[in-house]
Every structure is written in C-alpha cells, then in structure tokens.
Image (tube, helix red, strand yellow):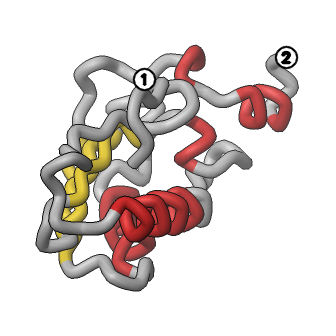
Amino acid sequence: MPDDMSLSETPETSEDTSGSKIPQEELDRLTDELIMAFKSVFDPEIPVDIYELGLIYKVDIDDDRKVDIDMTLTAPGCPVAGDMPGWVENAARTVEGVNDVEVRLTFDPPWDPSRMSDEARLALNML
C-alpha cells in the first residue's frame, strides 16, 4: 500500500516495503486491485461502497501475500454486522496473488462521517 495514507482517503498500512520480499510493482498492483475489490462491497443501507465510506481502517500485506484487514461499520448495531466482514474477505480473495485474507471488525476508533471521501459525500449530498 502507498506510504502516508490518510484514513479519509486510503486505509493505513504497516507493510515494510523496504524489507518486503514482494517487489514494489507487485505491491502497487495488489494495492490497486484490493481497493477495487473493496469498492465492490456496499453497505446495503447507504448507496456508497465501503471504501469511500472510510470503513477500511488498515490493510497489511505480508511476504506470504496474506492480507490482514481491519475494518469497521457505520454503527455497532448495523444489521449486516455479521455479514459484511465476510463480504470484504470474499472481495479481497478475488485479487490475483492474494493467498489468504483475515478481516477483523473493530469499533476503535468509532466511525464518523469525517472518514468519508469527497466522492461519498457528494453521493450522499453532504458537500
């Protein structure tokens, strides 16, 4: 994942690209394709994908191409709380070169609308 990502634009990453066995070009491709995969998952109550909503907090890609994802929901009582992490896992598994995926759901810090991208704000008439 690119360095110095803002949570409002892109998830945080902690991969060490200088010590990674995966070439930077491959990491960049995986990053781009994971973002596209995240953009295919929508909160059923909000007509915006989870990536633009800022629900993806952190993505790590290790040397074995295992992807660890920390994500949240717009609210702890979200009706799809039991389903959405599985949707995100399934989407990430579609990326060529990903060998394993683990999704962790967190509410720390709690999600708030400031995490949404400008694209999401525009789609929801919040600009």
Q: Is 31 in front, or is 86?
A: 31
Identify the residue at horizontal 33%, vertical 82% (top origin): 97
- How busy is the neighbourhood of tag 1: few (under 14 within 10 Å), some, or many (20 plus)? many
Instruction: Identify the element where label 1 is drawn.
Output: loop
Identify the residue at horizontal 73%, vertical 48% (top origin): 47
Instruction: Identify the element where label 2 is drawn.
Output: loop
Q: Quadrant of the C terminus?
A: top right
- How busy is the neighbourhood of tag 2: few (under 14 within 10 Å), some, or many (20 plus)? few
Badge 2 amino acid: Leu
- For disc 1, the marked residue is 111
Identify the residue at horizontal 53%, vertical 23% (top origin): 115
77 to 27, vertically: above or below: above
Residue 37 in picture, x, y percent from top left: 52, 67
43 to 67, vertically: above or below: above
- For disc 2, the marked residue is 127
Q: Is 62 in front, or is 20?
A: 20
Residue 119 in picture, x, y percent from top left: 77, 35
Residue 83 in picture, x, y percent from top left: 35, 62
